[in-house]
Image (spheres, helix red, strand yellow):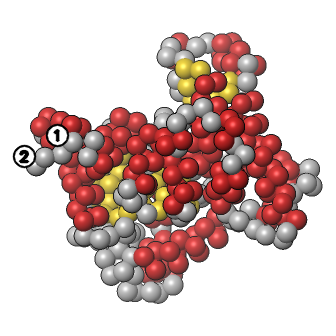
Amino acid sequence: MENKGPIGNFMLEHYKHFNAAALVDAAKGYEQHLAEGKKMMITLAGAMSTAELGKSLAEMIRQDKVQIISCTGANLEEDLMNLVAHNHYERVPHYRDLTPTEEWDLLERGLNRVTDTCIPEEEAFRRLQAHIFEIWKEAEAKGERYYPHEYMYKLLRSGVLEQYYEIDPKNSWMLAAAEKNLPIVVPGWEDSTMGNIFASYCVKGELQASTVKSGIEYMTFLADWYTNNAGSEGIGFFQIGGGIAGDFPICVVPMLYQDLERTDTPFWSYFCQISDSTTSYGSYSGAVPNEKITWGKLDIKTPKFIVESDATIVAPLLFGYLLGW
């Protein structure tokens, strides 16, 4: 048996069948992909930042095991919220038993629930809002426009949040990404708390919508990035969950190939999805990888893996395998 760190050795010894075996196969495929000098995209759906995936993802970024990230607006901001308000979060392990009245009581206390974890509105949302509004306003006054993640990078690099840090900064994947200036794509950013807050300033006439770059601009950026980084081999695609974080970026390949008629564009060269979606209901998130061949996203020969499990359990294990933990 090949020798890994304790996590990797445990997986190799015990994960021999079914989803466990698929996880090991996906980890080996990811490792091989990087060993061949190819780049990897990781996509984050769900509440992975609130699940504190930064504890492993930040090190993946620092060790150059991911070259670009696509995530929801919620994952973009919730890593920062955890960074500045972690001690004010409340866990509700009996969340399945809450009555509507008890849920209302959480609202009145300023606690917004994500499964078993409540995010404190005042310490998390409003703490970020006060500072990022100034960054939005300053950019607009200068006639400058940036992507949502670039504004978050500016916020982190300004140092203004350091007074609030409540976790070890090494566990923030956004801080690690800012230090690397890692490219991030945030499709549908408007569907997030900071997106809603930004929209509220636009309604009040205090900011213009054009101050934040759009999803179409993210796609054109991604088209250039893929073209410049794929070479002849293609980029790997590691998808956590479903939804727009994965659906949006994977389409860049058929867009380049079919719509722009750049027929030398290579397909995605590795694909893995961790998902608990099923294939029975027309769900794209639950579609098996082979369906993506028909859309011009994956090649017949692309290594394809699907781990039908809980990403909050599986992703840290796979990252631990790759990191030699």
The relative height of residue 130 versus residue 224 in the rendered view (above or below) is: above
- The residue carrying mark 2 is 1
- Residue 294 in percent (x, y) is at 35, 69
In which quadrant of the rendered image does the C terminus lie? top left
Q: In this view, does 26 lie to the left or right of 168?
A: left
Quadrant of the rendered structure where residue 117 is? Answer: top right
The relative height of residue 253 versus residue 17 in the rendered view (above or below) is: below
Residue type beneath disc 1? Asn
Marks 1/2: CA distance? 8 Å
SS under mark 1: helix
Quadrant of the rendered structure where residue 66 is? Answer: bottom left
SS under mark 2: loop
Quadrant of the rendered structure where residue 298 is? Answer: bottom left
The residue positioned 12% from the left and 37% from the top of the image is 13
The relative height of residue 208 versus residue 117 in the rendered view (above or below) is: below
Closer-to-camera residue (158/236): 158
Any part of residue 46 in sight: no
The residue positioned 54% from the left and 41% from the top of the image is 169
- Residue 27 in percent (x, y) is at 25, 51
- The residue carrying mark 1 is 9
Closer-to-camera residue (61/146): 61
Decide which of tag 1 and tag 2 comes sooner along the chain: 2
Report crowding for label 1: few under 14, some 14 to 19, many 20 or more residues within 10 A (C-alpha): some
Any part of residue 38 in sight: yes
Is mark 1 in CB contact (under 8 Å) with mark 2?
yes
Q: Is residue 235 left or right of residue 120?
A: left
Residue type beneath disc 2? Met
